Image: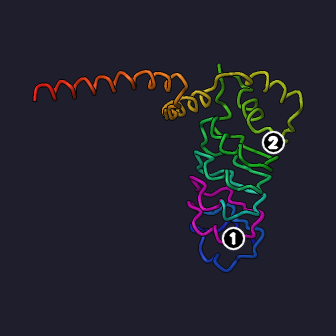
């Protein structure tokens, strides 16, 4: 179904379209994805050139979706995409995604092989203004991706990315370690603890008996 270049601002009236496999809503005024969850058979969804700010109501309902186009919107995060397990192609170029670590939301996607994110502020973000930092970061963390921003990922490129990031203490690694440290593990009783408790017991009983005898003599 094709409804591009209209004045559509909301996803309405889709309740009965449970068998729909393709939907093109490019160049409209859509701001939210409420109502999309009923399109359970959808395989391709084009929402390019709208006003979408975040991805909601797609996962896990659109379990058959293999292609999602969200170019030229107002996205600041990739949160909400990670539950689309069938997704193979994702187009999110020309949005407002600034943080490189947003691509980690795509890490759980088992079938994602094509990603286009060019035109986002994060593409210019790099360590020491390294122009290749964005691509190396994505290649390292999303190792299933074969085509990034229209360019194939070569084995040598993946090897360089591994050399740069493997063993590197990243912000994500530190946050995970701090999160785990904030939750103290349950204390385990050791043999040494048991031994100390056993050695204390006779003295405790002797002390109790002595106090009892002292009270009886006073009476």
Distance CA(mark 2)–CA(mark 1): 26 Å
SS for callout 2:
loop
Query: Which residue ends up furthest to the left in the rendered image?
Result: 219
Q: Earlier in the sequence, mark 2 or mark 1?
A: 1
Give residue 24's position: percent from left, percent from top: 73, 65
Residue for point 57% across, 29% down? 177
Q: Nearer the viewer, residue 22 or 28?
A: 22
Give the extent of the magenta segment: 31-59
Which numbered marker is on residue 145?
Answer: 2
Q: Quadrant of residue 58?
A: bottom right
Query: Which residue ends up furthest to the top in the rendered image?
Result: 128
Which numbered marker is on residue 39?
Answer: 1
Question: For residue 212: magenta?
Answer: no
For the N terminus, give its image quadrant: bottom right
Q: Quadrant of residue 120?
A: top right
Q: Quadrant of residue 143?
A: top right
Q: Is residue 170 above or below residue 60?
A: above
For residue 3, side relative to residue 160 (left or right): left
For the C terminus, give its image quadrant: top left
SS for callout 1:
loop
Q: Nearer the viewer, residue 44 or 217?
A: 217
Residue for point 84% across, 38% down? 151
Main SS type for the magenta part?
loop
Q: Nearer the viewer, residue 112 or 201?
A: 201
Residue for point 87% across, 38% down? 152
């Amino acid at each position: 179904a094709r409804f591009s270049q209209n004045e559509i601002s909301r996803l309405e009236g889709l309740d009965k379209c449970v068998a729909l496999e393709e939907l093109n809503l490019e160049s409209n005024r859509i701001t939210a994805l409420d109502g999309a969850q009923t399109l359970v058979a959808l395989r391709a969804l084009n929402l390019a050139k709208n006003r979408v700010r975040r991805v909601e109501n797609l996962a896990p309902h659109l379990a058959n979706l293999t292609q999602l186009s969200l170019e030229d919107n107002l996205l600041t995060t990739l949160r909400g995409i990670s539950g689309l397990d069938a997704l193979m192609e994702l187009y999110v170029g020309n949005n407002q995604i600034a943080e490189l670590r947003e691509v980690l939301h795509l890490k759980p996607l088992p079938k994602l092989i094509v990603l286009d994110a060019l035109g986002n502020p994060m593409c210019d973000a790099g360590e020491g203004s390294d122009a290749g930092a964005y691509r190396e970061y994505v290649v390292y963390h999303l190792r299933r991706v074969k085509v990034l921003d229209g360019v194939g990922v070569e084995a040598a490129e993946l090897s360089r990315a591994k050399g740069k990031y493997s063993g590197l203490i990243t912000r994500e690694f530190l946050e995970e370690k701090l999160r785990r440290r904030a939750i103290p593990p349950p204390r385990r009783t050791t043999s040494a603890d048991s031994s100390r408790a056993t050695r204390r017991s006779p003295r405790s009983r002797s002390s109790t008996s002595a106090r009892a005898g002292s009270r009886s003599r006073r009476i």
